[in-house]
Image (cartoon, rainbow, N blue to C red):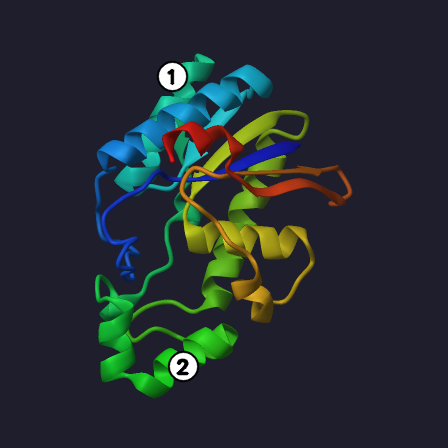
Amino acid sequence: MHIILTRHGEVEGIRPERFRGRMELELTAHGRQQAKAVAHRIAAEFAPQAVYTSPMGRCRDTGAEIASACGLSAQVLEGVNDLDYGAWQWKTHDEVQSSHPQDYALWKAASQWVRFPDGESLQDLALRTADALRTLMQRHADHTVVLVGHDSVNRALLLQALDLPLSAYWRITQHPCCLNRFEVDAHGKVVLHCVNDTSHLRELA
């Protein structure tokens, strides 16, 4: 199975950065342009057989652009929903750092030890994204599949693909509508081709 993993287009709350999580946010005008650009590249280079997205609107809208360009219909995959930040949702990083300095410092230094108040941990995220990937492997063993996720979701999937621990969470960067490509064979062996490729977005910068 060939996975084309991308992140949704730009939304409010990326600059200044907020804990977006399960907050429903529309793509900005620039985000819609990014979605069209990544859709054009995917359709031209990869000819996928299926498109799956997070249930959040920003991913469904990005996925709809990709699916339309590829002559497909996008499907929702619950397991790749964004990380649930609980009580921190929609707060800016400055606000959380000011109100919960020790917890925020731990999130930045050793995120694998954090559970967000009334929310999830990275262990929760890793478990459900692994379940989602298993579902795709069963449905699409020999197919090329597009998966539209979130910053945190994509990091978790790539950590597992690279056989890295959750403590490496901050070593991976995911820009809006970037491309990551990896293959998974029947024995679970992974070959990674690229991470956070944004070359198709240069003309929009």
Toward the viewer: 200 or 20? 200
Where residue 122 appears, as percent x and y from the top left, is: 47, 66
Quarter of the rendering occupied by the C terminus = top left
User: Which amino acid type corresponds to the residue marked 2 in the rendered image?
Assistant: Ala
Q: Residues within 10 Å of mark 1 (few under 14, many from 20)?
A: some
Mark carried by residue 105: 2
On the image, which quarter does residue 194 sit in?
top right
Give the label on residue 68, or none.
1
Residue visible at 37% across and 24% down in the picture: 36
Q: Is residue 125 left or right of residue 68?
A: right
The residue lying furthest to the bottom in this view is 102
Task: Measure the C-alpha gap from mark 1 to mark 2.
Answer: 42 Å
Q: In what element is the residue under mark 2?
A: helix
**Taking 86 as reference, is 172 above or below it?**
above
Q: Where is residue 152, by image quadrant?
A: bottom left
Going by the numbered disc 1, the residue's amino acid type is: Ser
Question: Is 85 on the left or on the right of 115, as rendered?
Answer: left
Residue at 30% x, 35% y: name it.
31
The correct choice, above or below, for 116 with respect to 40 in the image is below
Tell me the SS state at disc 1.
helix
